[in-house]
């Protein structure tokens, strides 16, 4: 079984909030606003770009009124409704992204198309480059050796799993159960060949 990498863990963490962000975006789209990535980003600062859209929509919808007072009144009502939806979305997004925490989500990780929110290809590539350096021959060889070591440890642990006389195939110096191999605090490997008699 392949171990989950740090990159996989970060991506999984971000994938887990996609539905919640769609929940933030949905009311905005249904209200008639066009949500692009930059609009989602602007929600963290109050949604200025969406408020501009709302003002334009309100102006269009009230263009039919000839009396300035009536036009102004209707425009204020319409923009007020939009601003309320936008402000609520801004609060919700900040909550989902844990904006006030020490480790908030990066809003640029998300891509919006209609009501659907996915992870941005650019962000994914940036994370991949950050967590998975470009392959060299030495790195390929190191990865192969690491995979082989993990597979061997898992196989040895599975081999003794049903043995009542052995606690583990491979363990650490902190584990006082009987084993075949243990690793000390300095990373030195110790074989316990005497324990083969329990197999």
Image (cartoon, helix red, strand yellow):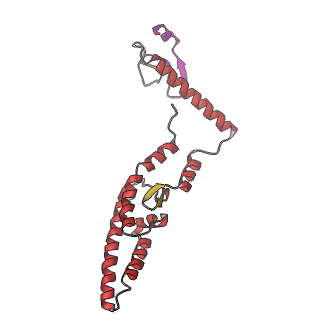
| Nearer to the camera, 181 or 163 | 163
Residue 192 shown in magenta = yes
The structure residue drawn at horizontal position 44% and vertical position 66%, both measured from the top left corner, is 35
In the rendered structure, the answer to whether residue 169 lies left or right of residue 91 reads: right
In the rendered structure, the answer to whether residue 177 lies left or right of residue 138 reads: left
- Image location (x, y in percent) of residue 129: 59, 49
- Image location (x, y in percent) of residue 95: 35, 58
Q: Residue furthest right?
A: 137
Number of numbered discs on residues? 0
The structure residue drawn at horizontal position 43% and vertical position 25%, both measured from the top left corner, is 174
Is residue 57 visible in this depiction of the protein? yes
Residue 94 shown in magenta = no
Is residue 97 visible in this depiction of the protein? no
Residue 132, quarter of the rendered image: top right
Q: Residue furthest top?
A: 197
Residue 143, quarter of the rendered image: top right
- Image location (x, y in percent) of residue 145: 61, 30
- Image location (x, y in percent) of residue 142: 63, 34
State which region is magenta.
175-199
| Nearer to the camera, 62 or 53 | 62
The structure residue drawn at horizontal position 42% and vertical position 23%, both measured from the top left corner, is 175
When the figure is inspected, residue 132 is found, relative to residue 61, above or below; the finding is above
When the figure is inspected, residue 168 is found, relative to residue 40, above or below; the finding is above
When the figure is inspected, residue 30 is found, relative to residue 161, above or below; the finding is below
Residue 75, quarter of the rendered image: bottom left
Q: Residue furthest front?
A: 64
| Nearer to the camera, 1 or 190 | 1
């Amino acid at each position: 079984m392949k171990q989950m990498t740090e990159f996989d863990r970060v991506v999984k963490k971000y994938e887990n909030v996609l539905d919640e962000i769609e929940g933030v975006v949905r009311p905005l789209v249904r209200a008639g606003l066009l949500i692009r990535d930059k609009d989602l980003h602007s929600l963290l600062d109050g949604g200025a770009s969406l408020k501009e859209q709302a003002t334009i929509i309100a102006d269009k919808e009230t263009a039919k009124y000839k009396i300035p007072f009536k036009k102004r009144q209707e425009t204020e009502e319409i923009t007020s409704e939009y601003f309320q939806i936008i402000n609520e979305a801004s609060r919700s997004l900040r909550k989902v992204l844990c904006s006030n925490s020490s480790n908030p989500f990066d809003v640029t990780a998300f891509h919006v198309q209609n009501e659907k929110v996915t992870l941005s290809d650019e962000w994914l590539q940036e994370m991949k480059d950050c967590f998975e350096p470009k392959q060299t021959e030495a790195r390929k060889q190191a990865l192969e050796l690491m995979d082989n070591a993990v597979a061997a440890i898992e196989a040895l642990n599975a081999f003794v799993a049903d043995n009542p006389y052995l606690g583990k195939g491979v363990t650490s110096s902190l584990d006082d159960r009987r084993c075949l191999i243990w690793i000390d605090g300095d990373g030195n490997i110790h074989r316990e060949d005497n324990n083969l008699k329990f197999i």
